[in-house]
Image (cartoon, grey):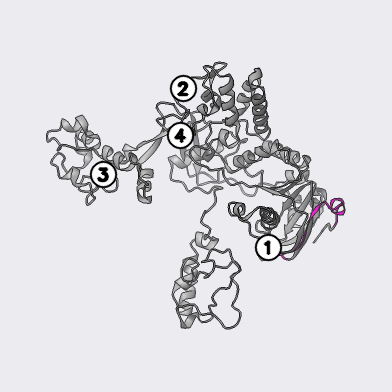
C-alpha cells in the first residue's frame, strides 16, 4: 500500500526539508523529505497526522529555532513554540502560518485597518482632500483628533434595550422588573414598590401607559402621577444607565453580563456609523468623503482610486492600488474597508492574512496554509490556487493541508499521511504526483476514483422557518422560507451573503451554532473537559480507588506540581500507585515518571 519517494531532484541539490523519525502526537517514526520551493499538498483522513506533521513539527521547529536567534528579552515576548519529538530535522526556513482562525479583534478592527488600506486612504485625504486638515491622524477613528466624540470612534453607541426590562404579565411583587437588583427582594425594589406611586400587586399590562412610562423614565411622566414620587426619584432606565453605563469604574463580570443582556448597539446618531468627527467627515475628494469610500465594495473603490491623478499623492495612490488589487485577486473584492473583522468568516480571515504577503519581497519562506478552500464556492477555488502558486513562484515553499482534489491536481507533490486516524494513522502512505495518487491504493486514491452519486432520496420537510426582510451586511430585504426537519445547504460564491443569512436565522429563531471559532481559549481545556466527559471519568476512577475525584483533575489536587497542570513541561510528577491508601499523592521509590504533557 505504501508508495514513497525517498529522493527528489530538489533533495539531491540539498533544497529540501529532511525529517527523520518524527513521533509528534500519532506520527509513527516517520521519515520524510519535503522539496522546497514547491507547492506541496498534505492529505489524509481527519486525525491521520497531517497537522501534526505540518504545524506541530515543521512549523513548530522552525518557529522555535528562529526565536532562539533573538535575545532573551525579545524571546519572552514572542509566541512560544513546543519543540516536536523528532530525531533529526534540517533544511528549514522561516515559517509563516496562515490558518483559518477568525481575525476577531476588538470593536475598532476593520478590513481597512487590518490590511493597512485605511492607512493609505487616510494619507490620500490628508494630501489632496479639501478642505485641508493636515496630518493623516485627523482621519483616524482610533486617534482622539479624528474620532467621533459621541461614540469614541466605534460607530455605534450602547443604549438600553428597554423592551427587555419588564415582564408585563407580572406585578412588581411578582418580579415584573427583570433587571437584576430591581425585582422583589432586590436592592432597588423598594424604590418602586414601596413609594405609594405604583400598584405593586397588579400586572403591569393592566397599568395605564403613563404609569409604565413613569416607572421606566421618571421625569414629567412621574410628576404627572396621582401619587407623585418622592424627590430624587429615578426611573428604572435612568437608574440602570447611571449604575451600568455612566460609570468609569472597572465593571465586574456580573455587571458586564447585565449590560450584555439589557442593552443593544445602535448606529451613532452623530457620525451615522462613520466613526469620524465632523471635521474629518466634511473633507471630500472628487466629491466623496472618506466615509463614503470606506463603504464601497473594494472593487468599486479600486476603480475610483485609479482615477486619481495628482503628483502630490502618486506614491500613496500606487501603494493603495497595489493593496486593493491584491484583495480583489484573492476574491475579496466584495468586502468594504468599513466591514468589522469580527463579522468575517474563517475563510475570509485566512485570505486577508494572505494579502499581507502577496507584495512581500521576502523569498525562501515556508508558508503553511490550513485548508484554504474550506467554505469556498467551486468558482472561487481557482482564485485561491492561483494565489498559492504566486507565493511559490516568488521563491517560497508552500505547504497546504487540504482535501480538495482541485488543489491536489495543481500541486507539485502530494503527501498522504494515514492510512487511518489516531493510532491507525501517523504513517507515510504516499508521496508523489497527483496522477500517481489517483491510481494509488490509499484511502485518498480510492476516494478520488469513487463515483459520487446521490445517496438517498430527499426527505419531506416538516414545516418552514421564515426569515423576513433580512438586511444584514449585503442582504437586500431578503425573505426566505427554510424547510424544517431536513438538511438544508446554503450555497453561493464567496461574499454572496450565506453567512449573513445564517446569522439572521440564528437571531430570529432558537438555533445552536457550530462554527469555525476555537472551542476554547483556555490552555487547560482538552477534548474531554470541553465535551463534559471528564467529571464522569474522574468519578469512576475515584470510586474504583477510594480516593477523592480531585486527584484526577489537572486543575485541582491531581495537577503536576511543576507545571500545575498546564501541560507544558516534562518534569517529574507524582506517582499515583499509592492513591488508594492516601488522599495525598505519594512519590514512588526510584525515578518517578515524567509529566510529558499529561497534566
Whether 299 is drawn above or below 594: the answer is above
**Left or right of 458: which side holds 26?**
right
Q: Are marks 4 and 1 in contact (CB under 8 Å)?
A: no
Q: Which mark is residue 177?
A: 3
**Residue 313's mark?**
none
Q: Horizontal and vertical percent for residue 349?
A: 60, 41
Q: Earlier in the sequence, mark 2 or mark 3?
A: 3
Residues at marks 2 and 4 touching, judged by CB atoms closer than 8 Å: no
* Label pair 4/3, CB-CB below 8 angstroms: no
What whole-number distance in Å separates the C-alpha atoms at marks 2 and 3?
43 Å
Q: CA distance from mark 4 to mark 3?
A: 30 Å
Q: Earlier in the sequence, mark 2 or mark 4?
A: 4
Q: Where is residue 487? Give x, y as percent.
A: 55, 46
Cα separation between marks 4 and 1: 44 Å
Query: Does 525 lie within the magenta span?
Result: no
Q: Is residue 9 magenta?
A: yes
Secondary element at image label 3: loop
Pointer 4: residues within 10 angstroms few (<14), some, or many (20+)? many
Label 3 vs 1, first from the N-terminus? 1
Point out the tag, 4 or 1, that comes first from the N-terminus: 1
Do residues under tags 1 and 2 come within 8 Å of each other at their CB atoms? no
Left or right of residue 47: residue 39: right
Foreground disc of the pair 4, 1: 4
x and y percentages locating residue 59 in the rendered image: 69, 53
Q: Nearer the viewer, mark 4 or mark 3?
A: 4
Q: Is residue 359 visible in this depiction of the protein?
A: yes
Instruction: Identify the residue under disc 4.
Output: 154
According to the picture, the residue beneath numbered tag 1 turns out to be 24
Examine the image and state in which quarter residue 426 appears.
Answer: bottom right
Please give the label number shown on residue 279: 2
Amino acid at each position: 500500500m505504501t508508495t514513497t519517494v525517498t529522493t527528489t531532484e530538489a533533495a539531491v541539490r540539498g533544497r529540501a526539508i529532511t525529517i527523520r523519525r518524527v513521533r509528534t502526537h500519532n506520527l509513527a517514526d516517520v521519515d520524510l523529505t519535503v522539496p522546497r520551493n514547491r507547492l506541496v499538498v498534505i492529505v489524509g483522513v481527519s486525525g491521520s497526522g497531517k497537522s501534526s506533521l505540518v504545524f506541530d513539527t515543521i512549523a513548530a521547529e522552525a518557529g522555535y529555532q528562529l526565536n532562539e536567534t533573538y535575545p532573551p528579552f525579545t524571546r519572552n515576548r514572542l509566541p512560544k513554540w513546543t519543540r516536536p519529538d523528532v530525531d533529526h530535522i534540517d533544511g528549514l526556513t522561516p515559517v509563516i502560518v496562515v490558518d483559518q482562525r477568525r481575525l476577531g479583534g476588538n470593536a475598532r478592527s476593520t478590513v481597512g485597518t487590518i490590511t493597512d488600506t485605511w492607512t493609505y486612504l487616510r494619507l490620500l485625504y490628508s494630501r489632496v482632500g479639501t478642505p485641508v486638515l493636515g496630518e493623516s491622524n485627523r482621519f483616524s477613528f482610533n486617534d482622539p483628533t479624528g474620532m467621533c466624540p459621541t461614540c469614541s470612534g466605534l460607530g455605534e453607541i450602547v443604549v438600553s434595550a428597554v423592551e427587555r426590562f419588564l415582564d408585563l404579565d407580572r406585578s412588581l411583587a411578582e418580579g415584573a422588573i427583570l433587571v437584576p437588583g430591581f425585582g422583589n427582594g432586590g436592592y432597588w425594589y423598594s424604590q418602586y414598590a414601596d413609594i405609594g406611586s405604583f400598584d405593586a400587586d397588579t400586572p403591569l399590562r393592566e397599568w395605564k401607559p403613563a404609569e409604565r412610562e413613569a416607572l421606566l423614565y421618571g421625569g414629567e411622566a412621574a410628576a404627572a402621577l396621582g401619587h407623585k414620587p418622592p424627590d430624587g426619584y429615578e426611573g428604572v432606565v435612568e437608574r440602570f444607565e447611571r449604575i451600568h453605563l455612566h460609570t468609569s469604574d472597572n465593571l465586574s463580570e456580573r455587571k458586564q453580563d447585565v449590560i450584555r443582556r439589557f442593552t443593544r448597539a445602535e448606529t451613532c446618531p452623530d457620525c451615522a456609523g462613520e466613526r469620524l468627527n465632523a471635521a474629518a467627515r466634511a473633507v471630500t475628494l472628487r466629491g466623496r468623503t472618506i466615509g463614503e469610500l470606506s463603504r464601497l465594495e473594494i472593487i468599486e473603490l479600486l476603480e475610483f482610486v485609479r482615477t486619481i491623478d495628482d503628483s502630490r499623492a502618486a506614491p500613496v495612490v500606487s501603494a493603495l492600488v497595489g493593496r486593493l488589487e491584491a484583495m480583489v485577486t484573492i476574491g475579496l473584492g466584495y468586502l468594504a474597508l468599513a466591514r468589522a473583522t469580527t463579522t468575517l468568516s474563517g475563510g475570509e480571515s485566512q485570505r486577508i492574512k494572505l494579502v499581507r504577503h502577496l507584495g512581500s519581497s521576502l523569498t525562501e519562506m515556508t508558508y503553511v496554509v490550513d485548508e484554504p478552500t474550506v467554505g469556498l464556492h467551486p468558482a472561487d477555488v481557482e482564485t485561491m490556487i492561483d494565489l498559492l502558486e504566486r507565493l511559490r513562484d516568488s521563491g517560497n515553499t508552500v505547504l497546504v493541508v487540504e482535501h480538495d482534489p482541485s488543489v491536489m491536481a495543481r500541486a507539485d507533490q502530494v503527501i498522504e499521511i494515514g492510512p487511518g486516524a489516531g493510532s491507525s494513522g501517523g504513517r507515510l502512505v504516499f508521496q508523489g504526483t497527483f496522477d500517481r495518487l489517483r491510481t494509488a491504493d490509499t484511502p485518498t486514491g480510492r476516494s478520488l476514483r469513487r463515483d459520487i452519486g446521490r445517496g438517498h432520496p430527499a426527505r419531506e420537510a416538516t414545516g418552514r422557518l421564515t426569515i423576513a426582510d433580512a438586511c444584514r451586511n449585503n442582504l437586500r430585504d431578503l425573505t426566505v422560507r427554510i424547510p424544517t426537519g431536513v438538511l438544508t445547504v446554503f450555497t453561493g460564491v464567496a461574499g454572496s451573503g450565506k453567512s449573513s443569512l445564517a446569522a439572521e436565522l440564528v437571531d430570529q429563531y432558537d438555533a445552536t451554532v457550530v462554527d469555525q471559532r476555537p472551542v476554547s481559549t483556555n490552555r487547560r481545556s482538552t477534548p474531554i473537559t470541553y465535551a463534559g466527559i471528564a467529571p464522569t471519568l474522574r468519578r469512576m476512577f475515584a470510586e474504583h480507588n477510594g480516593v477523592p475525584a480531585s486527584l484526577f483533575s489537572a486543575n485541582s489536587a491531581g495537577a503536576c506540581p511543576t507545571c500545575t497542570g498546564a501541560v507544558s513541561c516534562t518534569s517529574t510528577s507524582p506517582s499515583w500507585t499509592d492513591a488508594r491508601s492516601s488522599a495525598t499523592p505519594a512519590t514512588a521509590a526510584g525515578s518517578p515518571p515524567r509529566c510529558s504533557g499529561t497534566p
